[in-house]
Image: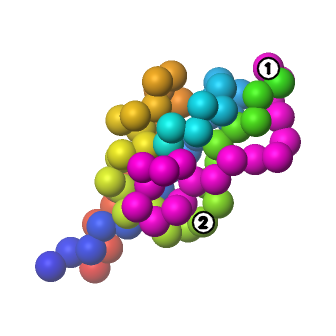
Amino acid sequence: MAKIKGDIVIDIERCKGCQVCVPVCPNDTIAMSDKVNAKGFKYAFKAQDNCIGCANCAIVCPDGVITVYKKKMK
């Protein structure tokens, strides 16, 4: 059975820091930055490389700033 490896890309300049994505991640892949983006918001970022590609974060993101990628691993 093939294992799925996930990855996310977050557009930090469009992120408003609502933090909705953080609690829905089953692997705690996403965290909030202490830094701010150009609009003055603290933004979400990929804190760990353990994404499973479930896309929960992208589904709940109200601004659609998270893109999820999936890759089959052998």
Q: Is residue 31 magenta?
A: yes
In the rendered structure, which amino acid carries the disc numbered 1?
A: Lys
Q: In this view, does 11 lie to the left or right of 51?
A: right
Mark 2: amino acid: Gln
Q: Pointer 1: what residue?
A: 39
Q: Which residue is drawn at 32% across and 54% down?
A: 54
Q: Position of residue 18 (x, y in %)?
A: 60, 31
The local secondary structure at tag 2 comes to loop
In the depicted structure, whether residue 45 falls above or below residue 27: above
Quadrant of residue 6 within the rendered picture? bottom left
| Residue at left offset 52%, top offset 62% | 28
Q: Residues within 10 Å of mark 2 (few under 14, many from 20)?
A: few
Based on the picture, tell me whether residue 63 belongs to the magenta stretch: no
The quadrant of the rendering that contains the N terminus is bottom left
Q: How many numbered badges does the structure rendering display?
A: 2
User: Of marks 1 and 2, which one's residue comes earlier in the chain?
Assistant: 1
Which image quadrant for residue 74?
bottom left
Residue at 43% x, 43% y is 57
Above/below status of 15 relative to 70: above
What are the residue bounds of the magenta stretch? 22-39
Vertical arrangement, residue 43 with respect to residue 4, above or below = above
Q: Which mark is residue 48?
A: 2
* 31 lies left or right of 65: right
